Amino acid sequence: MEKKNIDWGNLGFSYMETDKRFVSNFKDGVWDEGELISEANVTMSECACVLQYAQTCFEGLKAYTTEDGHIVTFRPDLNAERMEASAKRLEMPVFPKERFIDAVVQVVAANEAYVPPFGSGATLYLRPFMYGKNAVIGVKPADEFEFRVFCTPVGPYFKGGVKPLTIRVSDFDRAAPGGTGHIKAGLNYAMSLHAIVSAHEEGYDENMYLDPKTRTKVEETGGANFLFVTKDNKVVTPKSSSILPSITRRSLVHVAKEYLGLEVEEREIYLDEVKDFAECGLCGTAAVISPVGKIVDHGTEICLPSGMAEMGPVTKKLYDTLTGIQMGRIEAPEGWIKVIK
Ligand code: PLP
Ligand code: COI
């Protein structure tokens, strides 16, 4: 298979149209068989539920070329399960898990020429999503839906790769108690756009959102969960019902305990405690683990001892072990790697 002529090493995290995407439509209470198509554009009613009332949810996962030349994805079953939770919360039909995984496999296989080579630093990002497609004008769910998976080759989510980030404590809230913070609804990202644009304007890479009720506890950023390391090498990660259950974070918790023998605590974390931590990272499919060097809380700087030059040592070990598992250098726990080719 001849690869596309792409400058893999200089890709950012942006969209590039690839050859094929998988589409299945839901009508009269059933999903059709679905198929791979070439058309990247979508046509729908001006009054589609997704356009008027944001009835949409999505997922994100990656395909990798391993050291020995296989193409694999990482834990797609968990993306399927999370999309099921998102769909139910948004009154959308569930796309069955086995079909979700099969659609991912089909899209990767059909776009093999876009799967970045091993060692290039790039990966193939997959974006499964679903939206309410027919016209509704009263506030109610659609009854026709489209499920689609497309893919695009990507480089690092944050410019500068693994250079530590500077983030700010946001005055905007991300998710209300009892709201939709725990699912991957498009609306969670719409409300974060102003916050991220203004963070960038002020020179920050991301926002740290606090719990909206008390504004004392750390929640997450716009696109990643937090992971902290204490000065005695314990991994600590926020527990909250309004953060997205990150597959990367759940995998890192396992890696920390089972591969690195570290103690892990999932608990409420107060903003006041953050100054006492040794390391901080943002974890997610796109972010992998991106180290944070500085957190600014309304003019007060919290400088992590790991500094602004490189990842802290525990974050680095977690990063190396997780990417080692994903790239096939380190043996994966049962069921984590889905081999496509
Ligand atoms: N938190 C938010 C708000 C996200 O959008 C993402 C990205 O999917 C994550 C966390 C990380 O989740 P995962 O590791 O499953 O990609
Ligand atoms: C991901 O990590 O897959 C995300 O969805 C984060 C962001 C691109 C929304």
Image: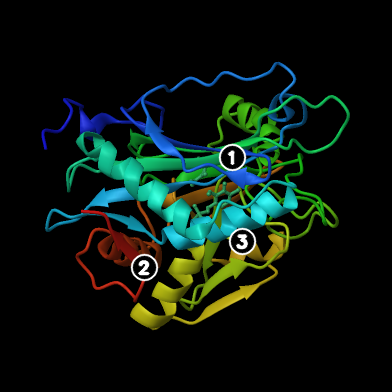
Measured from the top left, where is residue 320 in percent x and y?
A: 29, 62
Q: Nearer the viewer, residue 151 or 213?
A: 151
Return the disc, 3 or 2, that comes first in the chain's sequence: 3
Q: Residue furthest top?
A: 46
Quarter of the image that includes the N terminus? top left
Q: Residue 275: give its label.
A: 3
Return the disc, 1 or 3, that comes first in the chain's sequence: 1
Q: Is residue 263 above or below residue 6?
A: below
Amino acid carrying mark 1 in the image: Met
- Residue position for label 2: 336
Q: Residue at x 24, y 73 (%)?
A: 331
- Viewed as shown, does residue 270 lie left or right of 127? right
Amino acid carrying mark 2 in the image: Trp
- Viewed as shown, does residue 324 lie left or right of 272? left
Q: Residue furthest right?
A: 138
Residue 213, can we see it?
yes
Measured from the top left, where is residue 230 in percent x and y?
A: 52, 72
Callout 2 secondary element: loop
Q: Is residue 173 above or below residue 313?
A: above
- Residue position for label 1: 130
Measured from the top left, where is residue 114 in percent x and y?
A: 25, 34
Q: Are marks 1 and 3 in contact (CB under 8 Å)?
A: no
